[in-house]
Image: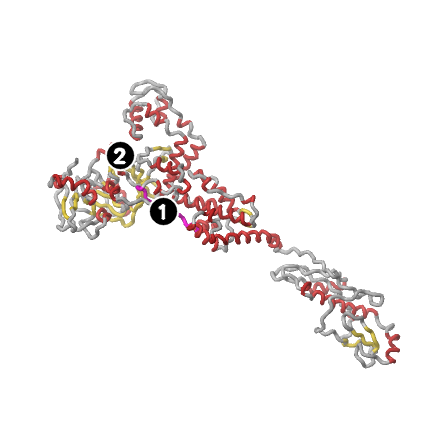
Amino acid sequence: MKGQSNPDITMCVEQPDRLISVQPVSKRFCGAKTSRRARANAGFAIPSLRLDRVVALTSLVFLLTSGAALAEPAGATADADKAAPSTGIVASPADAHSESTTGKAADSTGQTTAPNPAIPAAPAANDKPDESRSEPSAATPPAAAAPASTPDRPAAESKVPAEIPASPPTPTANSDQLVAAPSVDADTAIAGQLRDLTNGKFDHIIGDAKQRTAIDAFYSGRNYAPLWITDGKANARAKAAIAYLGQVAADGLDPADYPAPNFDSLSDPIALAEAEISLTTSVVTYAHHALIGRVHWSRVSGDISYDQSPPDPAEVLTTLADAKNASEALDAYEPHAAGYLALKAKLAEIRAGQRSADKAQIPNGPPLKLGMQDARVPLLRTRLDVADDGSTTYDKVLADAVKKFQQIHRLKSTGALDAATLEALNGHQPDRQTDIIVVNMERWRWMPHDLGKTYVIVNIPDYMLRVIREGRQVWMTKIVVGKPSTSTPLMSAQMKSITVNPTWNIPQSIASAEYLPLLQQDPTILQRMGLNVSYNPDGSIHLSQPPGEQNALGQIRFNFPNKFLVYQHDSNQKYLFGKDQRDDSHGCMRVQDPLKYAEVLLSIVRPGEGYTEDRIHRMFGNYEIDIQFPTTIPVHLTYQTAFVDDGGKLEFRDDIYGRDRALLAVLKGPDAKIADVPLQHKESTVRRAPAIMSDNAVGVWAGRGYGAGTSFFSRLFGGGLSPPVPRRPVPQHRAFNQ
């Protein structure tokens, strides 16, 4: 350092572990040997030295040694996330400017830490050290601490504390992040467990390799962050999903099929990861059941077919992750058709006991016949919705209602209240009603959940067809459906056209089984029955019935191509529509008023083109006429043994094909847990052949003439094998009915 104003005195700071030497200067550097005169004068110079300057320099030395201690790797290198430790030195009032200029240091995350320890204040302006005195070299390594104070050493040279107490972190705007750190670590540990999805760690919960792959795809896309857990606890999404799964009995499902874990009792990352996958599996399973059914339709009958596919598990989970309301997201998988929602409401009523008074038991007693008096008559009138006139007479109106009930339930239609009829009337008790509603709700899940803005819906057990447009019924008619042995299938298809004056092409299987034996007995019998006989290129016989009034299909056919080869058409047996129980066809549906049906449909798909009943009737003749639909109309063939009518009344119909019985057997059987897995049915053309037979076992149906193609389907829906002899119109013949 440069010398002070007194040229005779030179102050020298030697090594940090040595004392400060104050010596007279005799043209020698500090620490060199001085002259005798200088040594003699040393005693005179020291008393005249200003003590405040010594204190200032001592403070400087202390500062350097303290800096050296803090610069050590063990103590000077501070963690980026921790505040710098305090030295324990308190600044004097003169140090206020020094602290304000130092400010607060920012750590690596941008957060401010505790201020740096206070440093001794610099000397005042009038006490400023002489700048001519030399400073220690930066290359000189500072000592870790100053030596302890002794009587020969100034008290200002105190030793730096061996341990520097750390100041507590100063709260900041982001201090909540510091508090949440342990929870984040818990979620990270759970994510680490979830990474073992691909290794099959959770297969005992998921149980299906294909589903596991889809679930893993979802979690890997979010770096295995849990979906249902936040900060090591069940989040709001999980609580909403668990609450929803607990009340799915309202939709006819069993909450036990969708178990929910108890997150509150868990803290271990492994257990929490298993709970995460358990809830994920339950949610995915529920979405599957709600969208396409708890029981796969193939387990009930081979005469059922729908194209609905199960939801992809990854898509289900993504939907839940993005949803603002988990309950609403899950509810969206259930059907929302008016018929389904009406049944759901009735199911809730029955379970709440709100309808118990409406279905009071009819007491046992003697059989009732027309004209008899009985106290049970008023109750019987209420049960059969017959107006009550206050009389106890078993009159004709009541007897007719009993007879209708007997016909619907396949009882002997006598009109008398016998023991079998009474048992049937009392049979629909709450438990049975619940079962019937549940199986009907299940069948709604098999169907497309979007029925279409305009569609045709057939209820097979009700023997009715309805046309719905924009949610409103615009037309309805009676139909004849298949016999139990040749049942009308359950399915959905698209109606594409109407054929006027259809030809019926008899399938080879039916021709071989039923008509060729007759031909062998009498070579002319088929011609007398009004059938055309020709030969296919392979030499086999081809049979057909030409268009006409006596064609087995009538004069109009409604075409919606399907695997079962069934369709809707006119009938030349109109008397069948007068029956209450109309299951007399070979699988196709006969329409009571086909002309009006055609007018209604064409007014929808070809509006303004003038297709009235009269115009369509004038098209009747000996040649097929196809009217194509610019847009298709969905046709839904359903089996509703329970439904709510337009007046809000719950109606039941007879289980004519045993579909209720079969479905209940699966739901309550030993295979219920795997009932959502489809079964493969062997295709049988022999089984389907009667379904496409003519209603009076005479005639044929196909498209215009004989085009290319050899498939069974193409022969029935527009085209067939080319016969060796050109076809030409033939006069109409009256069909021969056996």
Q: Position of residue 672 (x, y in %)?
A: 40, 40
Q: Compared to 56, does 635 lie above or below?
A: above
Residue bounds of the magenta highlight = 302-314
Q: Please state if 490 lies on the left or on the right of 184 as rendered.
A: left
The verdict on residue 75 being magenta is no
- Which of 523/233 is in front? 523
* Residue visible at 40% across and 40% down in the picture: 671
**Mark 1 highlights which residue?**
308
Q: Is residue 502 visible?
A: no
Q: Position of residue 694 (x, y in %)?
A: 21, 40
- Which of 78/598 is in front? 78
Three-letter code, disc 2: Arg
User: Which quarter of the figure is the C terminus placed in?
Assistant: top left
What number is the disc on residue 582? Answer: 2
Residue 576 in which image quadrant: top left
Q: Position of residue 424 (x, y in %)?
A: 34, 27
> Please, what secondary structure does the residue beneath circle 2 have?
loop
- Which of 536/124 is in front? 536
Q: Please state if 371 lies on the left or on the right of 546 as rendered.
A: right
